[in-house]
Amino acid sequence: MTAPITGLRVSPEISRPFSPREFAARLRRVQAEMTTRELSALVVTDPANMYYLTGYNAWSFYTPQCLVVPVEGGPHLFARAMDAQGAHYTADLGPHQIHGYPEELVHRPDTHPMVWVTKTAVGLGLLPTGPGSRVAAELDAHFFSPRGYLSLQEGLAGAELVDSAELINWVRLVKSPAEQHMLRTAGRIAEHAMRTAIGAIEPGRRQCDIVADIQRAQTSGLNGLGGDYPAIVPMLPTGATAGTPHLTWSDRVMHSGEAATIELAGVHQRYHAPLARTLSLGPPPKHLVDCADAVSEGRDALLEELRPGRTAHEVHAAFTREIAKHGLTKESRIGYSIGIGYPPDWGERTVSLRHGSETVLEVGMAFHVILGMWMGTWGYETSEPLLVTATGPQRLTNVPGGLTIKT
Amino acid sequence: MTAPITGLRVSPEISRPFSPREFAARLRRVQAEMTTRELSALVVTDPANMYYLTGYNAWSFYTPQCLVVPVEGGPHLFARAMDAQGAHYTADLGPHQIHGYPEELVHRPDTHPMVWVTKTAVGLGLLPTGPGSRVAAELDAHFFSPRGYLSLQEGLAGAELVDSAELINWVRLVKSPAEQHMLRTAGRIAEHAMRTAIGAIEPGRRQCDIVADIQRAQTSGLNGLGGDYPAIVPMLPTGATAGTPHLTWSDRVMHSGEAATIELAGVHQRYHAPLARTLSLGPPPKHLVDCADAVSEGRDALLEELRPGRTAHEVHAAFTREIAKHGLTKESRIGYSIGIGYPPDWGERTVSLRHGSETVLEVGMAFHVILGMWMGTWGYETSEPLLVTATGPQRLTNVPGGLTIKT
C-alpha cells in the first residue's frame, strides 16, 4: 500500500547539516533511554524531534506524520505521499525507511492517516501489538491530535500506550559540538536582525514596515550565510500593547515618546537564537527606566549562577532576589531550554528556569533567558540566548543590554 | 484561582476587524448546530475557530488555550495568564469571559493546564459533568494534544466527550460579506507578493534573498494596507526539489535554465488568499511546457464547474478528464476551502476538491484551487484563490496564468 518511491534519493541541491555519525549517536542515546524505560517503540510527532533524529525538514507538519523508532534498529518515517520525496532528499534514512500514505486519506471524516500508519508500522514489525508490550508517544506534542492518538491506540490492540514525557526533548538538552556551532551561527543572525530592528524603528514608520526589515535580516541573513524561517514571527508589542507579550504587528504608525518591545530569533539549520530588547523612542518614563535598571541587576545576578552544577531553581532565585530589592516580582518563568525549533515555538519544552526546577545545569545546555515584565498597560522585556560552558554562560549575541533609547 | 485582570479592557491601538453583530451571528450559527447535535458544550482549540467566534488574535497557541462554548450563553476564553491581557484587547468578550491560568502550569510533567481549565469551566457551569450530557472537542485540531484531551475527559467525570468533527470549520465554509471583503483584500496583497516574486527571481540571486523580497511584500503590504503573517512561509522549490511541494528555501543561488515553483499567500486580518506560479529562468524544457498547457486546459475546464449547485466532485472530475487527454493524472486533491488561517495551515480542513466529495457549492464559499504536478525530479504548480459567486468563480488575484517564462 505504500506509494511508489520515485525520483532521486539524494538531491545535489540539498546539503545535510549533520553527519550520519551524529545522527547515529543521537539515535543511540534515545534508544538507550527507551531501554531504561522498557519501551518497545517510540512514536515521534514533534517536527523538532523528527529533525533531531533524521534531519527531515519540510513544512509538512500540518498533515499527520511521524517517525516510528523501535528500541533496536533504524527508525521509519511516515508522511503524506507528496512529502515522501522531500524526506528522501533531507532525511538520513534509507529508501525503505520512508513511507508515504495515500493522498486520499487527508482530511477525511471516516478515517485518519494514523490508522494507515499504525497498520503499516505494525505490519513492518516496528510496533508491537497486544498486552505485555509498551509503546510511547508524544502526548503533548503540537502536531499529534487526539484523533491521531486514538487511532494509534486502537491499532496497537492492547499494547500499552504511554506518554513519552518528552523523552527526546530531554535527550536534546545537552548540545553536541556541531549543535553548538549551529547555535552560535544562529546568534550571529539574531544579532544582525536585532541591530536592524533598532535601526528600523522610527517615529512615523508603520509597524509592518519595521517587521518587514526585521524579516529581511532574518531571511537573507549575512553574506555567505542565509537565514531560515523562525518558529515565531517577529513580535513588536508597542505602547499599551507592550503590556502583553504575544500580540503580533499591525499597520499602525510608531510615535515619538512610546516604547516598543522587540522579540525575534536568528535561525540557522532550524537552530534558534532568540533575542529581545525594549526600545524607547525619545526620553523614557521613569517607571520604565527604573524597571530596566532593576532587571539589569537581576540579569547580572542570574548570569553568575548560570553555570555547571547549579540548578535552574538557583538561577531563578538569583533573579527574583535581586529584583525584589526594587519591589518587583515576576510570576512567569525567566527562561527555558532552546535548540531546534519549528512553529509554533522555539522552546524545547523541557527545562524552565523557575522556582522549584531541580534540573542541574551542564556544559552544552542552551537557554533563552527572557526577562519580561508585563505590567498591564506597559512592559519591559530583555533577553539573551546563552550557552552553558565550563566557565559560565557564553552569550550567543552581542547587542548592548538594558533599555535602548533612541532620541 | 483566575489570575487578576489588570490594565485596560480595550486598547485604542487595536481595531477589531468585525462588528459585535457579526460575532453574534457566527455564535448563533454554531450554537444552532450544537443544538442539532445535542451538545451541551463545545471546546474550541483551533486558533482559527477561536478567532472566528471572538476575534482573539495572538501568537499564544503554543501553550494550551481554548474557548468553551456552551449551547446557550456566551463563550469563555481560557489562556495562559500572560496572554489574558491580549485577549482583553482583541476578543469580543466581556472581562468575566476571559480566564488566565497560572504561569506555573506551563510545561509541567505532573499536571497540565487543561486540568485547571476543565475544573474552572466546570465550576463556572460551562461544562457539564457526569453521564447523560455530551461535550464535543476538536479532536483533530493542530493545538489540542492528547494530554489536553485526556485531562478534559477526566475532568468531565463521565460526561460523554465526542469529536466536534470540525463543526465550526464547516460553519465557516460560507463567507459573510465582511469576510468576502477580507478575502478580496488578501487577494490584492497576494497579487502584489507574486508580482514581487516574479520580479525577484533572477539567475545569481540566493533563494533566501528572493524569499526576503516576497516576505517584504507580504508584510508591508500595499500603501495604506499593511500585510499580516501567513500561516505558511513562502515556498520556493527549485530545480530537482520542485518535484516535492513542501521544502523551504536555502541559500543556494538560482541558475539560468531552471524552474522554480512559488507558493505564497496574501493575508489580511488572518484571511488568506494563497497563490502559486511556476517560473522558468530561460527557455523551459518541452515536458514542462506540455504539462503547463495541459494543466491550463484542465484549469479552464474546472472553472466552468466551480459554481453554485455543482459538487466538489464535479469540479475535480472536470480537471482530471481534461488532463487525461494529455496522458496526465494527479493523485492528490486539486483544492480546498480557505478563509481564516493560522500556522501551520491556511486550509479550513473541510471541503477538498476531489473524487467522491459530495459537498454542493454555494455562493460565498472560497477555495484555493491548486494544481500541483509533482513529478519526482521536476514539478509544475499553479493556483488561484477563488470566491464562488452566483455567476461563477471570482478570482481574488490577477496574475497571468500558465507557465511564467523569464528570458
Image (cartoon, coloured by chain):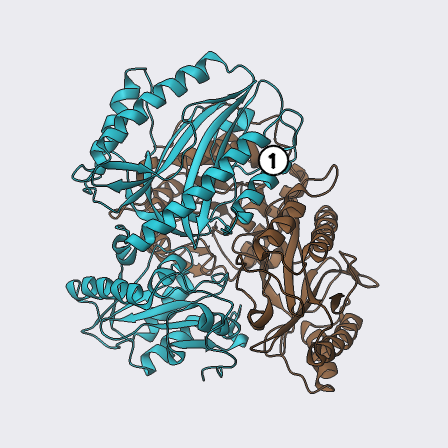
Chain colours: A cyan, B brown
Nearest the viewer among A258 and A123 is A258
User: Residue A345: x percent and y percent?
Assistant: 42, 48
- Using the rendered view, name the quadrant where residue B234 is placed: bottom right
Q: Residues within 10 Å of mark 1 (few under 14, many from 20)?
A: many
Along the horizontal axis of the image, is A16 left or right of A358? right
**Number of marks in the image?**
1
- The disc numbered 1 marks a residue on which chain? A
Nearest the viewer among B319 and A361 is A361
User: In terms of secondary structure, where does tag 1 sit?
Assistant: helix
User: Residue B5: x percent and y percent?
Assistant: 44, 27
Residue at left offset 33%, top offset 58%? A139
* Residue occupied by mark 1: A210
User: Residue B390: x percent and y percent?
Assistant: 82, 61
Q: Is residue A374 above or below residue B234?
A: above
Q: Quadrant of the N terminus of chain B?
A: top left
Q: Is residue B1 above or below residue B354?
A: above
Along the horizontal axis of the image, is B87 left or right of A392? right
Examine the rendering and report whether any part of residue A112 can be seen.
no
User: Which residue type carries mark 1?
Assistant: Ile
User: Residue B200: x percent and y percent?
Assistant: 68, 54
Nearest the viewer among B7 and A358 is A358
Residue at left offset 40%, top offset 19%? A291
Along the horizontal axis of the image, is A251 left or right of A230? right
Residue at left offset 27%, top offset 36%? A393
Q: Residue most toward the right? A: B391
